[in-house]
Amino acid sequence: MKKISISRFGGPEVLDVVDVPTPTPGPFEVRVRAHAIGVGWPDVHVRTGTYPWMHLFPMPATPGVEMSGTVEEIGANVTRFKVGQPVYVSSALLGMAGSCYVESLLVPEDLLLALPPEMSLDIAGNLAYYALALGMLKECGRGQRIQWVLVSGASGGVGTALVQVAVALGYKVIATVGHESKRQHSLGAGANEVLDYRDERLAQQIMSITGGLGVDLWLESYVGQNFSNALECMAPWGKIVLYNAVGGHPPASFFDAWRMHIAKCLSIQYFSAHVWERDPAPIRELTAQTIELLASGKIKPPSGTVFALSQVADAHRLLESGQHVGRIFLRPDN
């Protein structure tokens, strides 16, 4: 079988396609045949060595934090699964840095999640981002009176999930995107308003949309040097949540600007799913809730862009270009 391996940190060119023997499951293991392997920024951070702990991780390593697929073979003592059953794999539950960029993967029976028979494997491939969105909104919005949520970078995989989950939770959503071509995607995801984050009038537009109230919860994935503008648009007691920080961390001037808005009682918070690594129980619970939410049809993830597993470098290039909308998936070549 084929799997993706990295022996050094770097650009997409370090993603090697290698042939390895198909593994045989142990007594309590299940071999899962991949159908939809999610491609996301955590994979890029693993590939580039951005995560500090990756420098302690043994090489070669295999990226990939999630996959949907079917049971291909079971160990002699496995009782909860049968061949052909649809399942979901999360490396967050497995305690691994990745490993899902493979055609087939061995998973301990008690760490594998069963999928409803009626759920398509394509939709199930979105589970990590939608569970992340649900967890972010629930935890970061806890105890707040929320009317307006702003999602930056709303056309990407996590951004799309945040928009859809926020709408499902009953919030009004402002989405910001970087290109007019992505506007319809965010409107289709349920956003009430879609704005261009490059527009110099962004703050005025947000205040107009919210009737002068401002945003209660601002979910920011890019950050960068112009992020201080967000402070102008926040409602009293509002919260700014930073995650991913593709454009870098807030400049020092941000905290000076923050103090200028002290009368608003604003808060700022970093969010990372790694908070659950020591105790994966919340991830398991969130994933189960997300499976139920997606199976109900209340949220319908848009179709993603699919690459063959052997085209993994092209998939990473597309992700880093910022030109895609929705999720990117890998699929076994045959």
Image: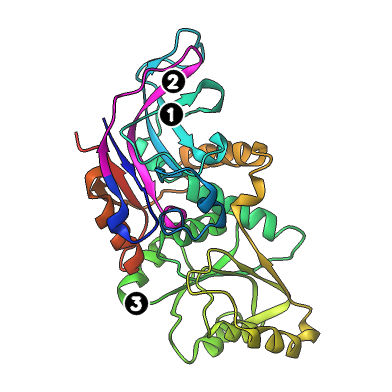
| Circle 1/circle 2 CB separation < 8 Å | yes
Mark 1: which secondary structure? Answer: strand
Residue 25: x and y in percent read: 41, 17
Instruction: Pick the quarter of the image with the C terminus.
Output: top left
Picture disc at residue 30: 2
Q: Which residues are magenta?
A: 17-43
Residue 313: x and y in percent read: 27, 55
Residue 308: x and y in percent read: 23, 45
Q: Earlier in the sequence, mark 1 or mark 3?
A: 1
Image depth: mark 2 or mark 3 in front: 2
Residue identifier under label 3: 179
Q: Residue at x 52, y 59 (%)?
A: 162
Magenta span contains residue 323: no
Residue 194 to residue 17: above or below: below
| Circle 2/circle 3 CB separation < 8 Å | no
Residue 120: x and y in percent read: 36, 35
For this view, does 88 lie left or right of residue 170?
left
